[in-house]
Image: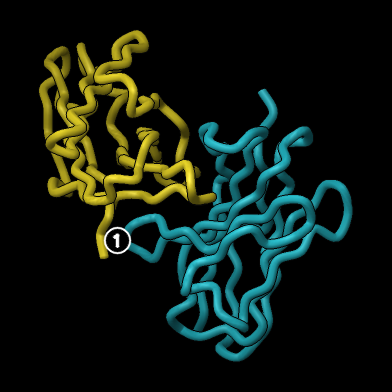
Chain colours: A cyan, B yellow
Amino acid sequence: EPEVTQTPSHQVTQMGQEVILRCVPISNHLYFYWYRQILGQKVEFLVSFYNNEISEKSEIFDDQFSVERPDGSNFTLKIRSTKLEDSAMYFCASVGTRNSPLHFGNGTRLTVT
Amino acid sequence: DQQVKQNSPSLSVQEGRISILNCDYTNSMFDYFLWYKKYPAEGPTFLISISSIKDKNEDGRFTVFLNKSAKHLSLHIVPSQPGDSAVYFCAALSNRDDKIIFGKGTRLHILP
């Protein structure tokens, strides 16, 4: 069964550095999402992306965050200047049609030191 | 603002018995509800869903019940098996929005 893949599985970075989290959604899916889960807390919506543009974003997704689909397969989340509170699991998800269950990747654990 | 609430952070159930996971929501615009299961070091996996036009949906050992007037849904697993030990997330979606809102999750332990 096709799956969403995320790399790296764990990223350690210093505060103030830029990170790029990578995702390869399921190939025929059209809607892409980033969620994050801070340890012990709920899974939070960050951003949705459709037709090469952001369709919705949360208040967490401020100017230091950006998303890109640079080619036909990758979907990336960039954090420009990381903060300690950005440490979390970041999950990419995709879906073929709206209001269908999302397919999640296994996540990237980001640790900001 | 917790639009989707799972008030039990954990639940322990004997193998073979019924597990009941509860979820409450506050947003009356939600019209589609999902349950996801998550193992450590993996992403959430879709389990079962229900549309607001129904009050029950069944898939094998898993049944989801929706009580719209009470803004409450529950997931029943029967019989519970050791592999069901995981964190279960309740999630909701509104037709107007483009995002799924998750609860905090309930950790289910199936005891031998």
Q: Where is residue B80 in the image (x, y as percent from the top left)?
A: 21, 18
Quarter of the figure with the C terminus of chain B: top left
Subunit ID for the residue under disc 1 = A
Residue depicted at x 62% and y 82%: A64
Residue under label 1 = A40
Residue that appears at 48% across and 61% down: A36
Helix, strand or loop at label 1? It is loop
Where residue A93 sits in the image (x, y, percent)?
Answer: 59, 46
Q: Taking A69 as reference, is B109 left or right?
A: left
* Picture coordinates of residue A99, whole percent (x, y): 53, 36
Q: Residue at x 63, y 42 (%)?
A: A94
B12 versus B48 height, above or below: below
Judge left or right: residue B97 versus residue B72.
Answer: right
The answer to whether B72 is drawn above or below residue B54 in the figure is below
Total number of numbered labels?
1
Q: Report the quarter where the N terminus of chain B lies.
A: bottom left
Residue type at tag 1: Gly
A96 and A37: which one is in front? A96
